[in-house]
Amino acid sequence: MDSKDRGRSAAFLLALLAGCGSYDHQELPLPATAGTGGTAGAGGGMAGAGGMAVPLCDALPPCGGDLVGTWTVATCAPTVGGMVDLTGLGLANNCTSAPVTSGSRVITGTVTFNGDGSYADATEMTGEQVYELPPPCLVLSGTTTTCADIAGPLRSVGFKTNVCVDNPATTGCTCTATVEQTGGLGLVSYNAAESGTYTTMNHALSMTSFGPDTEYTYCVSGSVLKLTLDSLSRTGPLVSPIVLQK
């Protein structure tokens, strides 16, 4: 390449760089969503910290907020996990819990928080879960029993139905149980309440009727309320939030 060709090539390269320089330093725009405390975003999401959209059914960090008003439960199905509490059922001493392998709750209806500190819970809850019963749990009141026969006594933790079958791999039982109740807002209980009083402090919510308070942490973000159930049900804890909307 002679000196003229080299000169023309250098000039072309400089022109190309000059035309692209402004693009190299340009930042791509973020989605048009609000920051923490914003409103619901497009596609069923809602605004989260840093302007990033959070899917409607996903958890948010506790943030508190104004609860007063009527909230409708969203079509999210909170997941059940953890352990089924088997204490106090007369089973063997080394049988105190059973792991939940799958399950969810379907909650519908409304909850109204009034300005005077009272609430009305018009929710319905159903659900199904599977849990694994260890072999030691087949001893009831000192007598060895079968998976089919142990299913009935285990209903007393709060299940509506409970069916257990032999699991050859573990020599224990695989149990499939259902729940069904009115009120309680996610907590499986024979004493599920449909009304009572409530208090809030920072991002904690306590709902009182009779018996122990039901405890939640919560976050109100625009027209969305997300409740994390802190009180433990004997049927296993919810490991995803209860979502409600105005």
Image (spheres, helix red, strand yellow):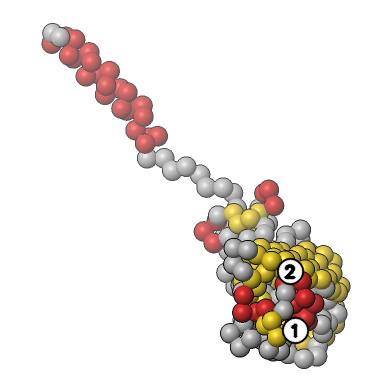
Q: Which residue is mark 2?
A: 164
Q: Report whether residue 42 is seen.
A: yes
The reply, left or right, for residue 60 in relation to residue 164 is left
x%, y% of residue 38? 63, 61
Residue at 82% in and 84% down:
191
Q: Residues within 10 Å of mark 2 (few under 14, many from 20)?
A: many
Which sits in the foreground, 195 or 21? 195
The amino acid at mark 1 is Met
Which sits in the foreground, 173 or 212? 173
Residue that lies at the very extreme toward the left in this rendered image: 3
* Residue at disc 1, secondary structure: strand
The reply, left or right, for residue 138 in relation to residue 209 is left
Q: Report whether residue 179 is seen.
A: no
Residue at 59% in and 54% down:
53
Asked if residue 50 is positioned above or below residue 146 in the image, the reply reads above
Q: Earlier in the sequence, mark 2 or mark 1?
A: 2
x%, y% of residue 210? 80, 90
Q: Which residue is mark 1?
A: 207
Asked if residue 32 is positioned above or below residue 203 in the image, the reply reads above
Quarter of the image for residue 193 reads bottom right
x%, y% of residue 47? 61, 58
Asked if residue 10 is positioned above or below residue 153 in the image, the reply reads above
The reply, left or right, for residue 143 in relation to residue 6 is right
Q: Is the N terminus in the top left, top right, bottom left or bottom right quadrant? A: top left
Q: Distance of mark 2 from mark 1, alpha carbons?
A: 34 Å
The amino acid at mark 2 is Cys
